[in-house]
Image (cartoon, grey):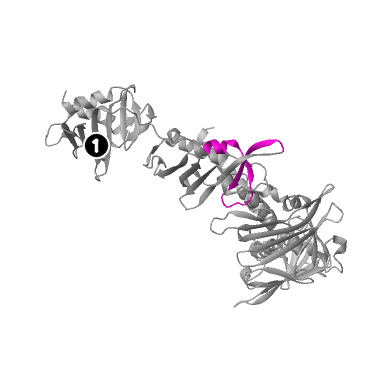
Amino acid sequence: MNPRTTAVLFVVVALLGGLAWWQLREEAANPTGTRSRPLFEGFDPGRVVAVRVDNLERDVQVRLRRSEGGRWDLVDPIEYPADAGVVKGLLEVGVHNAAVPADGVDPARVGLDPPRAVLELEQTGEAARTHRLELGALDVDGHSVYVRVDGEVLRTLQTVDASLERDLDSWRSRTVLPIGVGQVIDLQRSGTVREGDELLDVELVAQRDPATNRWMGVRPFGAALDPDFVQLYLLRLTTLQVEAFVEDAPLSLEPYGLDEPELVLRVGTLRGERHELHFAQPSGRTWFCRREGQNHVWRIDAPSMTILAAEAESLIDGRILRAPRETVVGVVLEREAGTLSLRRRGVLWEVSTDADPIWRRADTGRVEDLLAVLETETLGAPLPSVELAAGDVVAAFRVETEAGEVLGGEIGGPAALEGAGGRAFRRLGDQLVMLGGDTLLELARTPAADLRSLHVVRLSEAEQSRVRLSGGDGATQRSFVRENDGLWRPEGVQLEALAFARLVDRLLSVKALELIDPPGAPLADEVRVEVVDKLGDRTAYRLGRVEGVEGDVWESGGAWARLAPGRLDEVSGILTGR
């Protein structure tokens, strides 16, 4: 057979098979051949304000009502917040379920006289009405169920059956606190919790700074809290679920230990709301909970309580610096030798000290290494009995961010706790003294020379307009200008300065072998270099030799550096025309 003919026959067979499958599917869903219709005519779930369910098989009757704010509440047989997800699922059945008439079916034979359950949906607005659905038996196909809607017997998907086959508790919301993590601004915890044979005091008072969103402990210590742990804590608190509804309106709270709760949690929100939860574990195994102002007792799962009853000390932030690297704009190190300051200018860093207040280029890599230490260094245990008075501080550091936030801390004398040694340390904003590593003191004492860049001059040629060379006595001078065509020419001359063009990169980029202290001997064979950019800003330095210093010497603004030999001779040759 021709391959093309074979392919055509294959396509035809596939189409016929697909058509047959579709027809069988339609017949199964609609055996009477009648066209399907919506389960509820004119149904608008957004206008439903009340729901009544009467499950005759389970002997469960519930009525729910929606508030003006859109929240669903149980109003009968108990007043209680409803599970929004359950109500939403029920209303979606009314939207998505189609139905087909079951003509000629005896209602009694399909479980509709009497029905297994009755659903009423009260709808307001222009099309105000109450939709009534009676639930009958499951169809033999295992996918459909018989219902009677507004007096007409229909078949629809059995999802409606699953939506109504619920006991009372499954209609109730299991959320203990109906607030989000971001709404919490303060937390108060009190009480004593048993852990093994010990009773632990779990007192904690914490507040969130609305400007920085950072959490601070107030009691039993004044210290920054670990944002990751606080987030986990609040997430567990605000998503805490009722494991079981134990009792409504109990005559006494004593059987549950809630007459004298072991743990009390008070939460304040941005809206000014106050919520209070009481917890108790009378048997040592099961946790019970109630919310102040409500008369319901719940059972709570033990893993959640492990977090909510965690020791206050475990919430203390062990990190020193929590700021994205790219937001840091300044660092100040204070030590016995004076103050060292670093500031960021674009992608570059500059350094100055009390002894040398001129801002000089810093080595970016070394500054990044310093910041990396602050980011990764962690603090040890609290030292509650140690006080760090002003006279006890031997060094300090501050880190500034572009948002104006100042982070850092003060370093005191040697300290030890449980065999671990280090330094007393108090973070800025904290009252609590903690154990810090000796690395912090070493960092605070970093010499300026270790941070200065060996690139003592680094300028972009494209941004410069003029270079002036002169001898130490000022008698010999030569100027070169860069025209719009990018060529360097002697000032007043139209010919390109080829020899200077080959040297200019070494004038605009100078890397030292080392930074040196000001030498005692004078600078000999001096050549002065002045570079002027297109905006008129000037960079000036001197080159020469100093007795006792190997190689060339560079100086600018009181900073000195030793260069590899040869640069001075090259510049002198251009100056003298050799």
Residue stretch rendered in magenta on the structure: 418-443
Q: To which residue does mark 1 refer?
A: 530
Q: Is residue 61 above or below residue 304?
A: below
Determine if the magenta segment contains residue 550. Answer: no
Residue pictured at 41% horizontal, 44% vertical = 344
Give the residue type that dot 1 points to: Glu
- In the image, 121: left or right of 137? left
Residue nearer the viewer, 246 or 164: 246
- In the image, 6: left or right of 91? left
Residue 545 image offset from top left, x and y in percent? 28, 25
Q: Is residue 567 above or below residue 163?
A: above
Q: In this view, does 538 lie above or below 148?
A: above
Q: In which quarter of the image is the N terminus?
A: top right
Q: In which quarter of the image is residue 547?
A: top left
Look at the numbered disc 1 and give the secondary structure of its residue. strand
Determine if the magenta segment contains residue 429. Answer: yes
Residue pictured at 51% horizontal, 50% vertical = 406
Residue nearer the viewer, 15 or 542: 542
Residue nearer the viewer, 411 or 408: 411
Q: Quadrant of the C terminus?
A: top left
Task: Evaluate whether residue 466 shows in this view.
Answer: yes
Residue 131 image offset from top left, x and y in percent? 69, 73
